[in-house]
Image (cartoon, rainbow, N blue to C red):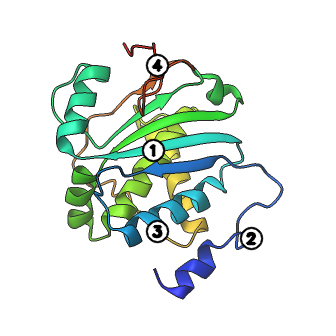
Amino acid sequence: MSGLDRDILSPGHGAPTSAPSASVDILDPTGLLSREALANLRLEAAAALSHIPRPGEVRVRLLGDAEMAEAHLKYSDIPGTTDVLTFDLSEGRTATGGPLDVDILVCIDEARRQAATHQHAPEREALLYILHGVLHCLGHDDHDDDAFDRMHAEEDRILRAIGIGPLFDPGAPPVPPSPVIHLGTRHSALGTPPGVSLP
């Protein structure tokens, strides 16, 4: 990332200063991204969340196709990989004003494929998936044309505010929607507490 990008993404540059924002923790346990790409993704995700006035936590785990396909089948009963799975541990309270409590699984293999098509870095595509998942938890939907336009306009607004600009291509072939899964506060898709079995 260039010095200019770091300046754009630094706190206070276009970021709300009085509104609380959620923290974001991005795990890459198998090293799917380089250290530099992972650092950039963490920086940009934190900057994006600073433009969403909601406290709380967003936890992200980066996966490959095989792990994502397993999670997709387990949680959505759909075979094959997908780009992102979002788990709203607030059981929908985030959409009505509660704090964010979100686990997000991001498929880096899919991010690489889409990034190559749209000519940007895989970590930028992963950023789009994270932002998309958070917006779903805030009550945004993309299942009809008007809601789709509103949701992607909000993604674009936030990405412009942090100096990146739109990443989503509405002319691209449609990807089947990945639902937000409400697991409740006792469950987590990123790691199961001892004695708790996920559905």
Residue 104 lies left or right of residue 29; in this view the side is right
Any part of residue 79 in sight: yes
Residue type pointed to by label 2: Gly
Sooner in the amino-acid sequence: mark 3 or mark 2: 2
Any part of residue 149 in sight: no
* Mark number, residue 194: 4
Disc 4 crowd rating (10 Å Cα; few below 14, some 14-19, many 20+) is: few
Q: Residue at x 28, y 52 (%)?
A: 108
Q: Secondary structure at mark 1?
A: strand
* Mark number, residue 60: 1
Residue type pointed to by label 4: Pro
* Front in this rendered view, residue 20 or 29: 29
* Mark number, residue 40: 3
Camera-near label (4 vs 2) is 4
Q: Residue at x 29, y 44 (%)?
A: 83
Q: Are marks 3 and 4 in contact (CB under 8 Å)?
A: no
Residue type pointed to by label 3: Asn
Q: Picture quarter containing residue 96?
A: top right
Q: Picture quarter containing residue 15?
A: bottom right
The image shows residue 136 at horizontal and vertical percentages of: 50, 36
Give the Cα separation between the discs numbered 1 and 2. 24 Å
**Which residue lies under the disc numbered 2?**
12
The image quadrant where one finds the C terminus is top left
* Mark number, residue 106: none
Camera-near label (3 vs 2) is 3
Disc 2 crowd rating (10 Å Cα; few below 14, some 14-19, many 20+) is: few
Camera-near label (1 vs 2) is 1
The image shows residue 188 at horizontal and vertical percentages of: 47, 26
